[in-house]
Amino acid sequence: MSERLSVVLDIGKTNAKLSLWSSQGRLVCSDTRANARRRGAHYPTLDVEGVEAWLAETLGRFGEIGAVGAIIPVGHGAAAAIVRDGALAAPVMDYEFDPPPAARAEYGKERDPFEQTGSPAMGMALNLGLQLHCIEQLHPDALRGGAQILPWPQYWAWRLSGVATSEVTSWGSHTDLWSPARNAPSNMAVRRGWARLFAPRRHAGEIIGRLTDEWVARTGLKSDVAVHTGLHDSNAALCWARAHPEFAHGDATLISTGTWFVSMRSLAEAAQAPPIPENRGCLLNVDVEGRPAPTMLFMGGRELELLGASGLDAPDRQGALLAAMERVVEVQVMVRPTLAAGTGIFPDRAGGWAAQPEGPVQCDAAAALYAALMIDAGLDLIGGEGTALLEGRYAQCQPFARALAALRPQSRVYVSGAESDLAAGALRFVMANARAPAPLIPVAPLPLDLAAFRAAWRDLVAAG
């Protein structure tokens, strides 16, 4: 019998990625698509049609490489699809939508206390409950007549298999729709009638069905391809991190880096979730078993773009960026948060350069140091004192990783040598005997004393 390959579908905010894996957990190939932002009649929408066309074409190419046996989707936690009669009942909202003040104020009166949900009121339409509130006003019939609400990863599982499901890591991602303490829908979700529309809950790794006849015809894949429930993208990376011995026991924090920088703390087995501040970019995620995971997030990738930083992870630039760091620290080239307005651990601050850098290399080095300072401050808020593991797009940026290691000498900071950490985490739900991940790589701290720079930066932030 020939080897069956597995596919991970990763639908992020900025990019969609499809990766093909061998039965031994080796990356065979991958393809990435930049996601377009569509203008709907009432709000910006996600590019569902474009992603679907790319997915069908890419799955077809993957099928020419080998026999595909399984597909598992992952996606960000700030989107959901309302489906009815085999189709979308309303366009899928892009969270970079600013609802009218009146709608936001009305919704604010409906939200449960932060202590019950661990979900803060966030900017734009990052709270999924706010999206449902707006959609209900703009498309009054969308949630009627047998409609079901599916989180973003499970929309794609439904599209491929025809089976509607939902999953806890997506419900528990700053949606206002989940109670981590009860591991059940929030009081507001029940009161508004949304909870009864949630598609049946399944475990992330459960096989919910097989590829539909439509997708068999579109892709040329076999009809026995298993479709798994899927999960929230940061939680997929957390599952991958927990496979490492350095991370598996005790208290550790995974720091995922992309459009969003997400620091998710994995508590020791018997530990209780600590109190976290409500208005500082902190929340309680939940893991695949429904356990709370204290989390801090800010729009790090977007802020680095707004600063003009580019190529931070390019291998041939690391030496020049590291050399520029000494001058950045010496003359105190600092960035004030927050550039992505209304988000992050300093949501009420207007960000920008406190002192202009001397050229593009120094700009990039200073931006990397700014990202490390933001992560450092956020880890203090969620109590992340133990092992820290960097993954994602910016993990290979040495000025960023090494500055973080220097700022937190009490922690052990690692990066991964894996090909795709998030996808490898999702893959562990498909392969019962997934191979042990590649060893983690300890990060050497920058040979600079950053204590004074950090103190000056925090004073700058405090001053507004």
Image: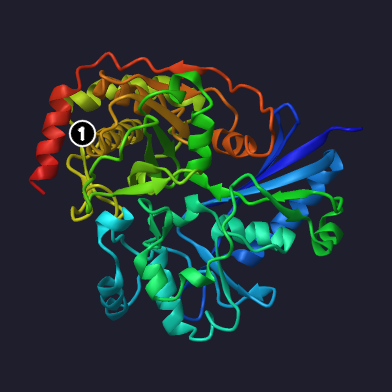
Query: Which residue corresponds to the image point at 54% horizontal and 32% vertical from the top-left?
Result: 240
Q: Position of residue 144 (x, y in %)?
A: 55, 83
Query: Which residue corresponds to the image point at 55% horizontal and 74% vertical from the top-left?
Result: 91
Colouring: rainbow
433 above or below 289? above
Location of residue 137 by image quarter: bottom left
229 above or below 371? below
Location of residue 52 by image quarter: bottom right
Q: Nearer the viewer, residue 382 or 207?
A: 207
From the viewer's perspective, tell me whether residue 206 is left or right of residue 393.
Answer: right
Q: Residues within 10 Å of mark 1 (few under 14, many from 20)?
A: many
Can you say which quadrant of the picture contains the N terminus? Answer: top right
- Find the residue positioned furthest to the bottom: 140
388 above or below 67? above
Q: Position of residue 363 (x, y in %)?
A: 31, 36
Q: Which residue is mark 1?
A: 333
Query: Which residue corresponds to the image point at 49% horizontal and 54% vertical from the top-left?
Result: 170
Q: Is residue 308 at all visible to an observer of this figure?
A: no
Query: Which residue corresponds to the image point at 41% horizontal and 19% vertical from the top-left?
Result: 319
Count how many numbered circles sit on residues in the image: 1
Identify which amino acid the numbered label 1 is placed on: Val
Q: Position of residue 413 (x, y in %)?
A: 37, 22
